[in-house]
Image: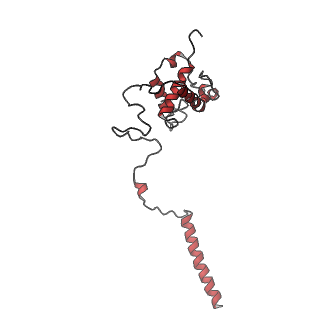
Amino acid sequence: MRLFKQLVIVFAVLGVLVGALMIFAYDVIKIDWVVFMEIQDSYTTQENPLPVPAQSIPVEGPAYIPGEGAPANPVPADETSIARGAELYAIHCQMCHGGVGKGNGTISAFLVKKKPADLTAELVQSKSDGSLFLTISNGIFNPNNSLFPEVEFSGQMPPLNENLTVRERWDVVNYLRTLAVPEGQ
């Protein structure tokens, strides 16, 4: 009988301890522990990114210098560059701009307010290589973003600087030059 009473007491104490542990483990009772992560400045993704340190160069090399205008194309438009550009265009651009760059890709039917640019048009082809590079790098910003105010662009061209390296962006620019409509058509 005495052994039974001791077992009941032991199990009762264990039950109380497990119950208390469960209350705190499942946040029934919330204990706010002060940690250093909570008292430091926090930023959401791409919120006020820090400026690039002075006189620094990205790992993949300098792309362009902000405030210095459009950069010059350092990549010759040879067969290799154009072939790479065509492949990258098919992956990143074709769904909106279409196979031949007319702005009639599979997604363009769903874009109601702003259709993708016709990359064969004189307006696009007359831009400098550096201007096309900056557009591919930075995308097209829409300040009137009423659908998704937390997103910096809304339905227009997103920046591809994180998807494509500097060299790959220049390859796409070289490929875009092959989309020009020949004179007389």
Compared to 64, does 31 lie above or below? below
Residue positioned 51% across, 17% down in the render: 123
Which picture quadrant has residue 120? top right
Number of disc labels:
0
Residue sitting farthest toward the bottom: 2
* In the foreground, 115 or 85: 85
Q: Nearer the viewer, residue 17 or 121?
A: 121
Q: Is residue 63 visible?
A: yes
Residue at the limit of the structure toward the top, as seen here: 184
Q: Residue furthest left?
A: 54
Q: Picture coordinates of residue 13 (x, y %)?
A: 57, 79
Residue 104 is situated, as x and y percent measured from the top left of the image, at: 62, 23
Relative to 90, is 129 on the left or the right? left
Which quadrant would the C terminus be assigned to in this image? top right
Please name the residue shown 42% across and 25% down the image.
Answer: 72
Residue 119 visible here: no
Q: Is residue 76 above or below residue 152?
A: above
**Of the pair 111 and 178, the residue shown nearer to us:** 178
Report the coloring of the rendering: secondary structure
Rendering coords of residue 131 (x, y %): 45, 24
- Quadrant the N terminus occupies: bottom right
- Find residue 172 and report its horizontal and vertical position in percent: 53, 28
